[in-house]
Amino acid sequence: MTISRRSFISGIVAGSAAAGAAFASDRANAAGLCSIPTKWDQTWDVIVIGAGGAGFAAGITAKEAGAKTVVLEKMPFPGGNTMVSGGGLNAAVEADYKAAGVEDSPQLHAKQTLAAGDYRADPELVRMLAEGAPKSVEWLKKIGVHFRPGIYQIYGGLWPRCRNPEGQSGSDYIKACVQYAKKISLDVKTGHKVTRIIRQEPNAGRVLGVEVEIDGKKENWRAMKGVVAAAGGYAANAQMCAFFDPRLEKLNTTNQPCSTGEVLRSIQDINGLAVGMDYIQCIPWTAPGYKNVADVFQAIEYTIFVNKEGKRYVAEDNRRDVIRDATLAQTDQTVYQVTDVVGFEENNKFYNEMNHAALKNGTLFAADTIEELAKKVKLPPEVLKKTVEEYNAMVDSKKDPLGRTAKMLSHKIAKAPFYIGPFGMCRHHTMGGARIDAKARVLDREGKVIAGLYAAGEVTGGIHGTNRVGGNAIADIFTFGRIAGKSAAEG
Ligand SMILES: Cc1cc2nc3c(=O)[nH]c(=O)nc-3n(C[C@H](O)[C@H](O)[C@H](O)COP(=O)(O)OP(=O)(O)OC[C@H]3O[C@@H](n4cnc5c(N)ncnc54)[C@H](O)[C@@H]3O)c2cc1C
């Protein structure tokens, strides 16, 4: 969806506490936002907006709690970003960390998540995320997801507590959700775009339902118990991101085109509070001017990043925001991932097809020596050779002047063939969004609950703080999706 700069700015203003209730009320009245339909086209107990991971978790939970539930999805197919995600899920599951010989607990998970988000996240929501994640793993198994054995430290994950479904990607979650939804007769309607959330008054009263666009025609659907917003983030909306962080406008995105943020703006239109809108995460993906990318950085212990000068410029196991800022400061905002055959094979456990395609489409190169490798992408061969030698020496000394942790100084780049591929920063995840409480109820600008409105997943804010830990989004969507579905069914 494209939005005009004017309407978007008015959306931001309406969402700001300084704007005051009167202004929002006038604007909402002027835009017809508070008009209550004279007739409802359909009536449900619970209406869920969005058929990604959070929406399915909410819909399934509400339906199983006995509520007449529908999930509305604007795209012709369900899945959202959840479907294209790597599927990495952080959870301190006792049996898993004990089997891996890793020290862990939900308390440690919460502590690290709070610190990684610079303490801007709500500690209660973070506690719920960490304690709820192992239960989400169980819930996913119950609906038919099979996990690969073992845990690892995902890129930006900061600790080895991540697992993936057998098929290695988020499509496993969506396949299981779709099948389970069929089994319990949960209605999931694709091609249904929510264009407005209907509240009794713009600043007061209950949320009554939604306006939904089907084949260009608008209808009003009533939700007797609650509306759950699970419409994902806004990283595909370059303009919306650029208003909050102008550096990001020209970057590519990893997101599906559906991540445009209009449901979040509808929440703001009815006085919902949005927080952390300028916390926008980037990750390594297609370099500026490229259409494809290789991914040999998920298993980060096997990979180093170098700039066009052939030098490392950041600790590769650092926080995602630190890597974003460091990468955006490099020549042409283009850098390179370097690994050897061992790292290539390890990363291919996640991105096998993509990496083999990358070898053909000019986004990954292989060579038997580091000097030859450098020549393939026009880096200074002697400098790259020295960089790799220095890095290998750090694996022995366990000390990196850039601060890579000893745990991640575990594998030398030593076994030919060697691999190199360009990458840049892409808009990936929006940490900001609708502020919720512990029952996933959306709060207004005075911090009061908006009755009848719940939210879960990337559309929310306040769970990750300034920087989302890799693997925590999948934990978030299934944990808070289940909470929102339960709360909505209770009305
Ligand atoms: C390439 C990629 C890889 C990732 N890998 C990982 C990973 O390994 N681990 C991890 O933790 N996180 C990962 N993430 C992040 C994670 O996948 C997302 O944060 C998460 O899936 C969001 O889930 P969601 O349910 O909130 O939103 P989504 O899954 O995006 O679903 C939202 C749905 O709402 C629909 N929608 C939007 N607006 C409307 C509307 N107006 N009306 C009706 N429907 C609407 C959308 O079409 C979409 O289907 C990755 C993201 C990407 C893009």
Image (tube, rainbow, N blue to C red):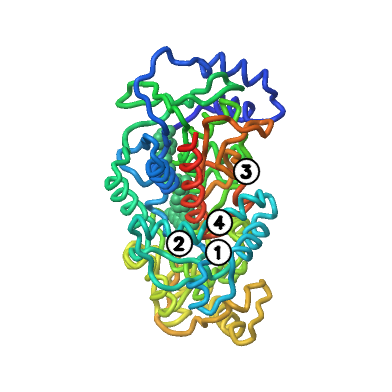
CA distance for labels 2 and 1: 9 Å
Check contact, mark 2 vs mark 1: CB within 8 A.
yes
The location of residue 19, given as percent across then percent down, is: 69, 25
Q: Local crowd at mark 4 within 10 Å, few (<14), some, or many (≥20)?
A: some
Examine the image and state in which quarter residue 321 appears. Answer: bottom right
Of the numbered discs 3 and 4, the one sitting upstream in the chain is 3
Q: Which residue is mark 3?
A: 278
Q: Which residue is mark 1?
A: 157
The location of residue 280, given as percent across then percent down, is: 58, 47
Label 1 sits on what residue type? Gly
Left or right of 425 on screen, residue 341: left
Q: Local crowd at mark 1 within 10 Å, few (<14), some, or many (≥20)?
A: many
Q: Which residue is mark 2?
A: 88
Q: In terms of depth relative to the viewer, which is nearer, 346 or 212?
A: 212
Left or right of 451 on screen, residue 18: right
| Residue at mark 3: C-beta within 8 A of ligand 1 | no
Of the numbered discs 2 and 3, the one sitting upstream in the chain is 2
Residue in the picture at 52% in, 81% down: 411
Q: Local crowd at mark 3 within 10 Å, few (<14), some, or many (≥20)?
A: some
Label 3 sits on what residue type? Asp
Is residue 140 positioned above or below 122 on the image? below
Q: In terms of depth relative to the viewer, which is nearer, 232 or 145?
A: 145
Of the numbered discs 2 and 1, the one sitting upstream in the chain is 2
| Residue at mark 2: C-beta within 8 A of ligand 1 | yes
Q: Local crowd at mark 2 within 10 Å, few (<14), some, or many (≥20)?
A: many
| Residue at mark 1: C-beta within 8 A of ligand 1 | no
Of the numbered discs 4 and 1, the one sitting upstream in the chain is 1
Q: Which residue is mark 4?
A: 333
Tell which tag, 4 or 1, sits nearer the viewer: 1
